[in-house]
Every structure is written in structure tokens, then in C-alpha cells.
Image (cartoon, rainbow, N blue to C red):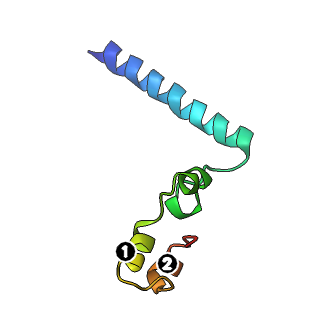
Amino acid sequence: MFRFFLIVAVLVAIAVAGLAIGILIKGKFPDTHVGRNADMKKMGITCAKNDSALCQGRPNSEGCRGCSCAG
């Protein structure tokens, strides 16, 4: 049982190290916020706050500006 946990701990450590190395090589942490993610914008996916404000007929509401979504 101990050997199993040791193997799992080593695999998790390798995965975390790989993610850290990837961030160090790119020089920045990946932007995962929907409103600022270029790939999400290409697919037409917007921030939930933005969608909610548009549904309520307030395209320039605080909901849009509050999360930095690009309309």
C-alpha cells in the first residue's frame, strides 16, 4: 500500500513540475478568464456576466465592465 502512494506522489510531482516548466518557458501563466481568452472569443463564447447583462437589455452595465469582457 505504501508503494502505491509513493508511486502516485511521484507521478503527481512530475505532473506539477511539467506544468511549472511550461509556465516558466512561456513566461506567463495562461489566461483562463473567458472574457480575455482569444480562443474563446473566436468561438463566440463570452463571460456569463456579459451574457446576463445583454439578456437584461443593458449592454454597458456594470456586469460587462466588472469582468473586463469585451462586449
Could you tell me which secondary element the residue under label 2 belongs to? helix
Residue 49 point in image, percent of width and height: 41, 72
Name which residue type carries label 1.
Answer: Ser
- Residue visible at 33% across and 21% down? 5
Quadrant (top left/top right/bottom left/bottom right) for the N terminus: top left
- Badge 1: residue crowd in 10 Å (few <14, some 14–19, many ≥20): some
**Sooner in the amino-acid sequence: mark 2 or mark 1:** 1
Residue 70 % position (x, y): 58, 70
Residue 8, located in which quarter of the rendered image? top left
Instruction: From the image, tell me which residue sits under label 1.
Output: 52
Choose between 26 and 37: the one closer to the eye.
37
Q: Amino acid at mark 2?
A: Cys
Residue 24: name its quadrant: top right
Report how far apart the C-alphas of labels 2 and 1 lie in the structure: 9 Å
Q: What numbered label is drawn on residue 64? A: 2
Could you classify mark 2 by the number of other residues whose Cα lies within 10 Å: few (under 14), some (14-19), or many (20 or more)?
A: many
What x and y, as percent, mark residue 45?
A: 47, 57
For residue 55, which quarter of the picture?
bottom left
- Left or right, 25 with respect to 33, comes to right
